[in-house]
Amino acid sequence: MHRCMVLLLVAVLMAGCTGQQTAKPPADAATFPVSSTAFDDGGMIPREYTCDGSDRSPPLAWDSVPGEAVSYALIVEDPDAPFVTFSHWIVYGIPHRTLALEEGIPAQAELPGGIRQGTNGFGRIGYGGPCPPAGAPHRYVFRVYALDIMPDIDGTADRERLLAAMEGHILAAGELTGLYGRNA
C-alpha cells in the first residue's frame, strides 16, 4: 500500500512539473524575427555554444518594435528537458535601442547599459549552454520579449521572477529555435 502511494505521489508531482507556463504575449501582439549568425532557426546549435564546447553564448539579433517598447527581455529554455522546462539564460533590462547581444556575454549579473542577467537552471548567473542527456536532440528556444516597462527586480531574477515581472507588460515577442543532441 505504501509503495502505491509513493508512486502515485511521484506521478502527480511529475505531471505538475511538466506544465510550466511560458510567458505569452496578448493574442493581438506583434511578432518580430530573432536570428543568430551562428545557427538558423530550426538548425543545429554549434558545439562551441554548448557544455561540450566553450559554453559561450551565441550572438543574437532582433528587429525593433515600433512605438512604446521600453525594454527587451530574453529567456532561453529547453522544453524537452525531463520533468521541467529548463532555463539556460535569463537576460532583462535590455534598453529598447539595443537590438543584439554579442557572442560570449560574460557571466556577470550586471552588464553595460543596465542590462542584467539572471540565474539559469544550473543555478549560475548568465548563459548555460545546451547539455542534454544522450538521445534525441532537444529544442532550445531563444525568446525575446518587447516590454512596456523596465523590469524592477531586486537582485538577480530566475525564470519565474522574470515571468511574474513581465506579466501584463509584453507588447510583442519573437523566437529562434536551435537543436542540440548528444550520442548515447
Image (cartoon, rainbow, N blue to C red):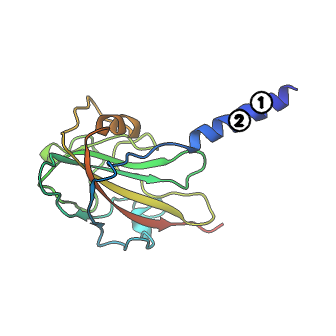
Helix, strand or loop status at disc 2: helix
Q: Which residue is mark 1?
A: 6
- Quadrant location of residue 104? bottom left
Residue located farthest toward the right when viewing the structure as drawn: 1
Across and down, in percent, residue 31 comes to 28, 60
Q: Quadrant of residue 11?
A: top right
Is 132 left or right of 154, judged from the image as shown? right
Residue drawn at x 30%, y 35% as measured from the top left:
165
Q: CA distance from mark 2 to mark 1?
A: 6 Å
Give amino acid for label 1: Val
The amino acid beneath tag 2 is Val
Locate the C terminus by quadrant. bottom right
- Coordinates of residue 28 in the picture (x, y in percent): 29, 53
Q: Residues within 10 Å of mark 2 (few under 14, many from 20)?
A: few
Can you give x and y, in whole percent of width and height, for residue 153 in the image? Answer: 26, 31
Which of the 4 image quadrants contains residue 144? bottom left
- How busy is the neighbourhood of tag 1: few (under 14 within 10 Å), some, or many (20 plus)? few
Percent position (x, y) of residue 37?
29, 73
| Nearest to the observer: residue 100 or residue 48 | 100
Pick the front one: 111 or 173: 173
Marks 2/1 in contact by CB < 8 Å: the verdict is: yes
Q: Residue furthest front?
A: 28
Residue closest to the eye, 175 or 36:
175
Is residue 150 positioned above or below 100 on the image?
above
Q: Which mark is residue 10?
A: 2
Residue at image x 28%, y 30%? 155
Q: Quadrant of the N terminus?
A: top right
Label 1 element class? helix
- Residue at 13%, 57% (x, y): give it: 66
